[in-house]
Image (tube, helix red, strand yellow):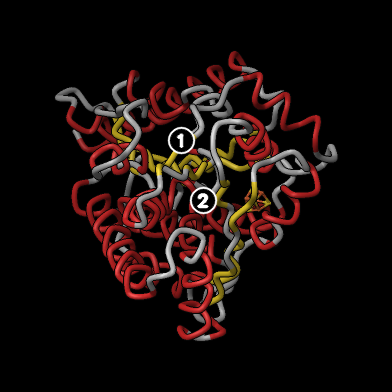
Amino acid sequence: MVSVGIPRALLYYQYYPMWYTFFHELRAEVIVSPPTTQVMLTAGSYRVVDDTCLPVKVFVGHVLSLIGECDYLFIPSVRSVKSKVYNCPKFLGLPDVTRAVVPESPFILDIDVDINKGKRELFKSINKLGRHFTRNQSKIRQAAMLAWQANLDYQQQMYRQGLTSPQGIERMSGGPATEPKTGASQSPSILGTIAVIGHPYLLYDELINHRFIQRLEQAHVRVLTPEMVSAEDRESAISKVVGEAHWTYEDEVVGAGEHYLSRGIDGVIGIVAFGCGPDSLMMDLVRRQARLGSTPFMSLNLDEHTAEGGMATRLEAFLDMIYRKRRQRACASA
Ligand code: SF4
């Protein structure tokens, strides 16, 4: 059986169930790289220039870990999935960058995803991808349809059941069994509710974020993430802040941030990768919105030098501030 490797990084968290379904339907074995390790991060960092953002360094580390493990690597170039809304340029060049910095990688299956070129072009690209596995066009078409349905189910499941991406992936058939579980939302002794916003590849990579979400849960905080907001709610929140979205990630940063702020939560934490251009603008918008409503906001920058101790200290200080605020409110209303 032919095997396809998928790096557990970047768009994996958004699209894994869809990708898995497509390749599985075409009778390919899907191999996902293991969770990020320090060795992977170091190896990835050596292959790219210093000022590359942390998630791309992690991605390259995952690619390196799949060498010798699979026949093909799947690395799509996702330009746009919504009309006139574009992805960060790093995603556009990902297959070419990978070929350049990891010349020994398995053959890269890439596909251009740009909805602005029309559905016909997209189907042509999907068909070209599927022809690596079968010449039967109707099989490819059916695999694509099932994959799209898996994607819709995955997104809806996270929103309806309040799941994070790793939990959603685990619940979908075929998800890797090594994902972390979160569960504080069911805890009976919740001390506060905090929205954690940012890209899923920052929120759910436990090596680079030092188990940030688990730390919050251990502190009996209910954690809300961008996947738990419906697409409609995020869009309407974006329109309040910026009018029309132009960046794909305005959704999960500005949209989710504004949505949670308008619901009156205890605080917002924005997770940003050092050197990320789009986030430097978008997270600032959320910070301003939080200030308007006097909601505590903290932005955490991640890079390969982020120390676990420093992260824990900042988190404790932020939680102290939130608890103090709650106590003051309770005293004032008593
Ligand atoms: S959005 Fe930011 S963190 Fe993500 S790939 Fe682009 S530059 Fe890197």
User: Which label was assigned to residue 63?
Assistant: none
Residue 229 pos. (x, y %) = 31, 56
Q: Viewer-proximal residue, 193 or 145?
A: 145
Residue 109 pos. (x, y %) = 59, 56
Q: Viewer-proximal residue, 141 or 170?
A: 141
Contact, CB < 8 Å: mark 1 with mark 2? no
Is the N terminus in the top left, top right, bottom left or bottom right quadrant? top left
Question: Which residue occupies 51% across, 60% down?
Answer: 132
Amino acid at dot 2: Leu
Q: Which residue is mark 1?
A: 204
In this view, which residue lies farthest toward the left?
188
Question: Which residue occupies 43% across, 26% down?
Answer: 319
Question: Which residue occupies 29% across, 33% down?
Answer: 222
- Residue 302: quadrant of the picture: top right
Residue 64 higher or lower than 42, as above or below:
below
Q: Residues within 10 Å of mark 2 (few under 14, many from 20)?
A: some
User: Which of pointers 1 and 2 indicates the residue nearer the eye?
Assistant: 2
Residue 315 pos. (x, y %) = 50, 24
Q: Is residue 243 left or right of residue 86?
A: left
Q: Is residue 54 left or right of residue 82?
A: right
Q: Viewer-proximal residue, 151 or 330?
A: 151
Q: Is residue 142 left or right of residue 161?
A: right
Residue 242 shows in this picture: no
Q: Is residue 180 left or right of residue 5?
A: left
Residue 164 pos. (x, y %) = 33, 41
As helix, strand or loop, the secondary structure at mark 1 comes to: loop
Residue 88 shows in this picture: yes
Q: Residues within 10 Å of mark 1 (few under 14, many from 20)?
A: many
Q: CA distance from mark 1 to mark 2?
A: 12 Å
Amino acid at dot 1: Tyr
Q: Which residue is mark 2?
A: 11
